């Protein structure tokens, strides 16, 4: 038991004091989506992949991988309703379909799901 008491602080020090990794810039969800929007002139691939908890139902493809996103606004509500209806229909059929959409960021700070997973708030734009 005495050895365990010495081992725990040493492990905490080793894990908590990582050297060079702390120097690396950690990209945020919003940064990843912003970079993607910049490089694609606002056109992104999204997929409807609802989480098991209360969270944004869409994901956005970025260079860093898929990140959570939600459409908080839309130029035309009908377009957002149509996208959501198509996505829910495809999902009900067991399809994980990607949709090309025109979007922009609503805010430069992430929103958070119930389990503290960050996501980007997007605006669905019409062409």
Image (cartoon, rainbow, N blue to C red):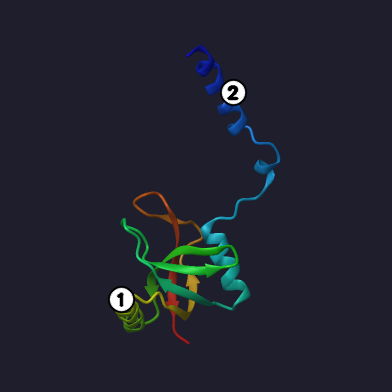
In the displayed structure, 18 sits above or below 75; it is above
Task: Tell me the SS state at disc 2.
Answer: helix
Horizontal relation, residue 49 to residue 19: left or right: left
User: Where residue 116 sits in the image (x, y, percent)?
Assistant: 40, 49
Rendering quarter of residue 39:
bottom right
In the displayed structure, 15 sits above or below 52; it is above
Q: Which residue does the image show at 39% across and 76% down from the upper left?
A: 74
Q: CA distance from mark 1 to mark 2?
A: 50 Å
Q: Nearer the viewer, mark 1 or mark 2?
A: 2
Q: Which residue does the image show at 31% across and 57% down from the upper left?
A: 54
User: Where residue 125 sits in the image (x, y, percent)?
Assistant: 45, 80
Horizontal relation, residue 17 to residue 43: left or right: right
Q: Which residue does the image show at 57% across and 60% down from the upper left?
A: 31
Which residue, as the protein is rendered here, is positioned at the far bottom? 127
In terms of sequence position, does the residue under pointer 1 or pointer 2 come before the other? 2
User: Where residue 23 sits in the image (x, y, percent)?
Assistant: 69, 44
Front-lying residue, 78 or 116 = 116
Which residue, as the protein is rendered here, is positioned at the far top? 2
Front-lying residue, 127 or 100 = 100
For disc 2, the marked residue is 10
Horizontal relation, residue 69 to residue 19: left or right: left
Rendering quarter of residue 98:
bottom left
Task: Tell me the SS state at disc 1.
Answer: helix
Return the mark for residue 8.
none
Q: How many marks?
A: 2
Return the mark for residue 88.
1
Disc 2 crowd rating (10 Å Cα; few below 14, some 14-19, many 20+) is few
In the displayed structure, 101 sits above or below 112; it is below
Q: Which residue does the image show at 58% across and 70% down from the upper left?
A: 36
Front-lying residue, 85 or 7 = 7
User: Where residue 103 sits in the image (x, y, percent)?
Assistant: 48, 76
């Amino acid at each position: 038991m005495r050895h365990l008491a010495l081992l725990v602080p040493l492990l905490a020090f080793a894990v908590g004091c990582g050297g060079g990794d702390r120097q690396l810039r950690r990209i945020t969800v919003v940064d990843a989506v912003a970079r993607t929007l910049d490089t694609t002139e606002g056109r992104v691939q999204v997929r409807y992949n609802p989480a098991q908890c209360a969270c944004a139902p869409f994901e956005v493809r970025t260079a860093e991988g898929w990140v959570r996103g939600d459409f908080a606004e839309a130029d035309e509500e009908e377009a957002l309703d149509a996208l959501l209806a198509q996505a829910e229909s495809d999902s009900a059929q067991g399809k994980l379909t990607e949709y090309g959409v025109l979007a922009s960021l609503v805010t430069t700070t992430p929103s958070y799901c119930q389990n503290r997973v960050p996501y980007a708030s997007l605006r669905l734009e019409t062409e």
